[in-house]
Amino acid sequence: MRRHYPQHRVIRPMGHQGNHGRLAASALFLAGLGLLLFNLVASIPFGHAPLHVGRAILERASGETGADNIVTAILLGYRGLDTLGEVTILFTAAAAAGMVLASAGRGQAQGEDAGFIFRTAAWMLFPFLLVVGAYIIIHGHLTPGGGFQGGAILAAAFFTPLLASPASPFNHRVATLVEGFAGLAFIVIGLLGMLGGGQFLTQLFGKGAPGALFSAGSLPVLYLAIGLKVGSELAGLMASVFGGKEKA
Amino acid sequence: MMTGLILHASAIGLLLTGIYAIAARRHLMRNILGLAVLESGANLLLVAIGYRQGGHAPILVAGQTPGPMVDPIPQALVLTAIVIGFGVLALALALVVRVKENYGTLDNREVAERLRAESREARS
């Protein structure tokens, strides 16, 4: 049996029904936590990071992985398996959000068209966003950026037209396919590394010349896979929130 | 010294503000905004801890002798944290959309009361 609830009830401000105790408890907790954190941070003088593992990585990362961007070297070279887990978490969250929203009986376009100017501008931005996103992904081992950052820009390229007009085409099937194959590519590259008797995600190709586009072994390929996966995931997630016409 | 104090204080301040918004506020959107603020505070704190005086970004440039660089490990961790934070935020917002559709309110205590009432009804 379902009770009928009044809709849109006003939210009462805090402290109406004897919430002072709760407020005091939170204040006490926050003060304690703040004190703890301050003491913890004070033990590391600012500007003099201890660099226990960091120093070794700074010295050896470029020689061991071939990547000029040391953050990339850590992310894909030293803890590539963790990054695979991270991508899996993102995938799970996106899938769960899509599931939660899909059961609401959506799928049809929502919201209003933002008008001719916005629509045109969004489509004019589209190629530039694609190029910038691809550049950032492909140069992830040389310059700041990488698969996650570039993937977010790729997603923006597909998502901006949807913001301008919910009736813009968005092909969920292609997004899902790209996402699946990108994830598969990451795992296949990892498994190929094991063929030569190495461990999961052992570098496949040579390290190449430092600073060259084709260097750092399989790291750029892995970042390309991550970029495509993140891009299609984010775009699909946004599209499932904001609608978007299904293109058959 | 002063910069460090300001950075650490603002990072911890953001952390505490986020926790306050999650624990003491009743509006679900504010809880989620608190989560976002909490995350940025934690990320700022981590990156600030990895800073070195006069350090550069941990990226080698061809043809230049590398100067002192900041600790790259917190940066890699924060990159991970940002990505996961995005996923958590997206899922939380999707759930809030459903809560609003089902209960017509975004007051978390009211939603909790109704959930309790519904489970009581289901039992009886």
Image (cartoon, grey):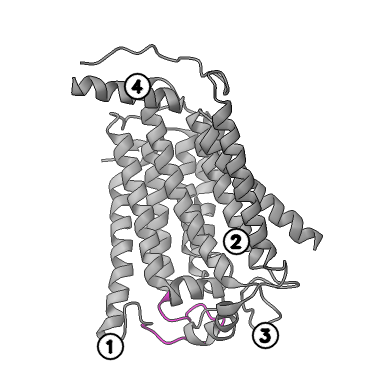
Residue occupying image coordinates x 51% and y 28%: B27
Q: Chain of mark 2?
A: B
Circle count? 4
Alpha-carbon distance for marks 2 and 1? Answer: 38 Å
Q: Nearer the viewer, residue A100 or A158?
A: A100
Magenta span contains residue A216: yes
Can you identify the residue that label 1 sits on? Answer: A196
Q: Quadrant of residue A117?
A: top right
On the image, the x and y values in percent for residue B61 come to: 64, 79
Camera-nearest residue between A127 and A59 = A59
Give SS at disc 4: helix
Can residue A169 be seen here? The reply is yes
**Viewer-nearest of labels 3 and 1?**
1
> x and y percent of residue A22 in the render?
54, 31
| Label 3 vs 4, first from the N-terminus | 3
Marks 4 and 1 sit apart, C-alpha to C-alpha, by 59 Å
Q: Which residue is mark 3?
A: B63
Which of pointers 2 and 3 indicates the residue nearer the eye? 2
Q: CA distance from mark 2 to mark 3?
A: 30 Å
Q: Pointer 2: what residue?
A: B46
Using the image as rendered, state which of residue A158 and residue A29 is in the foreground. A29
Few, some or many residues within 10 Å of mark 4 (<14, 14–19, 20+): some
Q: Nearer the viewer, mark 4 or mark 1?
A: 4
Q: Is residue A238 visible?
A: no
**Helix, strand or loop under label 2:** helix
Question: Dot 4 corresponds to which residue?
Answer: B114
Specify start and end residues of the magenta stretch as a single range: A204-219
Amino acid type at mark 1: Gly
The residue positioned 28% from the left and 82% from the top of the image is: A194
Chain letter of the residue carrying label 4: B
Residue contact between numbered discs 2 and 4, judged by CB atoms under 8 Å: no
A155 lies above or below B93: below
